[in-house]
Image (spheres, rainbow, N blue to C red):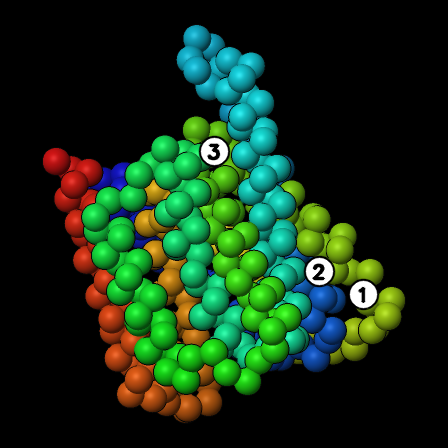
């Protein structure tokens, strides 16, 4: 299996884990910011423990290469902090937006992220989007609109505005992570969870959480699997595929949410949702295969 295919499969695995968030969060009757902070605290402890158990510190940069220069090191540090800030902002803004507008609006607007990833990746990483990326972006935008057939409704201007911002930060996160393809993007993820926990957990003083077994188990699942292990897949994949391709592939996340709802409650998605999902999956699959073949050539 070639490098690009491994990267794409890792992003798919990440999207599958990300998509379980909705079901787990429904099991926790806590303040949203407390959920976000607690989830990130668990993820931070989990990722830090893995790093200690692996016995590996930051990989030394090779002397004599561009990455080994002082400028290269400073650029990598800037990318690390940029990715951490963008990811922490995405997680916190997503929670806030869900409180202020319809969930469908948040997902629809947040997954404008591939567009921002394409533009920022072109500007910062010098990875010019290919024709397959532009075609896939257009198809994904159409498919998402069809998937949420009623479009933007039932929300607030502030909530929808925050959702748009979360799309920008999500796209920026993928680009800053891609800038660390020769470093350790996992460091950005760990730092992002520490920041999110520090901001979210103090809300427990205002809205003390009820420590039921169901809620605690759901928080552990969210921290370890839904964003902990998922982030490791994303870090692995972003080293091997461009930021825009990673974001396009991650669009599988909102498509899988109705699948988990179907399995858990028996609620079936409508015809428009199925059609929109089909358009998106086709676009992402075709662009991925096209990109893999280009890479092989």
Q: Quadrant of the C terminus?
A: top left
Relative to 232, is 99 on the left or the right? right
Name the spot of residue 59 as percent of width and height, x first: 51, 25
Q: Is residue 282 above or below residue 233?
A: below
Residue 73 seen from this side: yes
Q: Residue 203 — which label?
A: 1
The secondary structure type at the circle numbered 2 is helix
Label 1: state its secondary structure.
helix
Q: What residue is at 30 percent from the left and 70 percent from the top?
A: 142
First in sequence: mark 1 or mark 2? Answer: 2
Residue 105 position in % (x across, y down) = 50, 75
143 to the left or right of 161: left
Q: Which residue is mark 3?
A: 180
The N terminus sits in image quarter: top left
- Write down the residue under mark 2: 37
| Residue 205 appears left or right of 184 | right
Residue 142 is left or right of residue 178, and the answer is: left
* Cα–Cα span, label 3 and label 1: 33 Å
Q: Which residue is drawn at the image coordinates 40% and 41% (left, top)?
A: 121
Residue at the (25%, 73%) spot, across then down: 278
Q: CB under 8 Å between callouts 1 and 2?
A: yes
Q: Residue at x 47, y 10 (%)?
A: 63
Q: Which type of secondary structure does the marked residue at label 3 adopt? A: loop
Q: Earlier in the sequence, mark 2 or mark 3?
A: 2
Is the Cβ of the residue at disc 3 closer than 8 Å to that at disc 1?
no
CA gap, disc 1 to disc 2?
9 Å
Compared to 106, does 89 lie above or below?
above
């Amino acid at each position: 299996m070639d490098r690009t295919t491994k990267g794409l499969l890792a992003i798919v695995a990440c999207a599958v884990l990300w998509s379980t968030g909705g079901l787990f969060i429904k099991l926790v009757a806590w303040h949203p910011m407390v959920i976000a902070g607690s989830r990130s605290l668990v993820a931070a402890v989990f990722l830090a423990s893995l790093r200690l158990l692996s016995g590996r510190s930051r990989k030394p940069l090779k002397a004599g290469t561009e990455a080994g220069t002082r400028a290269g090191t400073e650029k990598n540090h800037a990318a690390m902090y940029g990715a951490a800030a963008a990811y922490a902002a995405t997680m916190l803004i997503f929670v806030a937006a869900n409180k202020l507008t319809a969930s469908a609006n948040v997902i629809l607007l947040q997954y404008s992220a591939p567009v921002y990833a394409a533009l920022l990746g072109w500007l910062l990483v010098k990875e010019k989007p290919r024709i397959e990326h532009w075609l896939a972006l257009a198809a994904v935008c159409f498919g998402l609109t069809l998937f949420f057939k009623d479009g933007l409704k039932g929300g607030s201007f502030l909530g929808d505005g925050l959702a748009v911002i979360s799309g920008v930060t999500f796209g920026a996160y993928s680009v800053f992570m891609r800038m660390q393809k020769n470093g350790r993007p996992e460091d950005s993820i760990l730092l992002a969870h520490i920041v999110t926990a520090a901001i979210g957990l103090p809300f427990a003083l205002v809205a003390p959480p009820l420590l039921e077994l169901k809620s605690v188990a759901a928080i552990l699942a969210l921290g370890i699997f839904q964003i902990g292990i998922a982030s490791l897949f994303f870090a692995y994949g972003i080293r091997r595929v461009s930021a825009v391709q990673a974001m396009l592939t991650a669009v599988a996340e909102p498509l899988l949410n109705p699948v988990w709802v179907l399995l858990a409650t028996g609620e079936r998605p409508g015809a428009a949702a199925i059609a929109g999902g089909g358009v998106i999956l086709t676009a992402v699959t075709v662009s991925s295969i096209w990109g893999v073949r280009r890479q092989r050539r």
